[in-house]
Image (cartoon, rainbow, N blue to C red):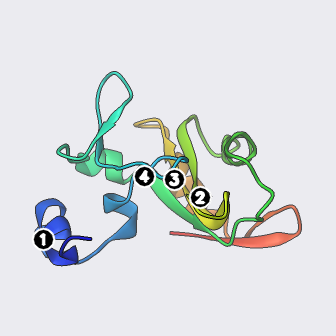
Amino acid sequence: RGDRNSYYGKHDSNNNSNINSNDTSSVSGGGGGGRHRSGSYSKGDQLSPEQLQNKIFVGGLPLHLNKDELRDFFSQFGTVVDAIIMMDMHQQRSRGFGFVTFENGSGGAQAALKAQPLYIGEKYVEIK
């Protein structure tokens, strides 16, 4: 594992770790970074300020939830372009949190934040 500050220093000018803007790992637990026009991620890219406003962290997810169900739930707030659930690669199960990215200009992230508290099933989920 590398130095945490050196990684985040490349992505955050204040050198603070901000999970919303820096962790774009895939469901399979792969690396992250910005999104290319083709839709794939690469570690060297940075998200624009507009893209960062469209991405939310979702914590406290039910462990049985899959990424399609996550996408379907948040589509009530705007067009979802990406939904990921972070996985524990050793145990092959959800880590209980993920990220949802809405289409630029949809206002989906802001709508979801305003709609709190949110429940998926009977479980309260926290979004940031």
Label 3 Cα neighbours within 10 Å, binned few <14 / some 14-19 / many ≥20? many
- Between disc 2 and disc 3, whose residue precedes? 2
Residue occupying the far top of the picture = 38
Looking at the rendered structure, the secondary structure element under dot 3 is helix
Residue 77 in the image, given as x and y percentages of width and height: 64, 46
Tag 2 secondary structure: strand
Front position in the image: 97 or 92: 92
Q: Which residue is mark 3?
A: 109
Q: Residue at x 71, y 39 (%)?
A: 68
Residue at numbered disc 1 = 6
Q: x and y percent of residue 98 in the render? A: 57, 59
**CA gap, disc 2 to disc 3?**
23 Å
Q: Is residue 58 left or right of residue 13?
A: right
View extreme (right): residue: 122
Which residue in the protein does label 4 denote?
25
At 12% across and 71% down in the image, what residue appears? 6
Closer-to-camera residue (106/98): 98
Specify few, some or many for label 1: CA neighbours under 10 Å numbering under 14, 14-19, or 20 or more. few
One can see residue 117 in this view = no
Q: Is residue 33 left or right of residue 83?
A: left
Q: Which residue is mark 2?
A: 87
In the displayed structure, 123 sits above or below 23; it is below
**Contact check, label 1 and label 2, Cβ < 8 Å:** no
The N terminus lies in which quarter of the figure?
bottom left
**SS under mark 4:** loop
Q: Amino acid at mark 2?
A: Met
Which one is in front in this view, the residue at disc 1 or the one at disc 3? 1
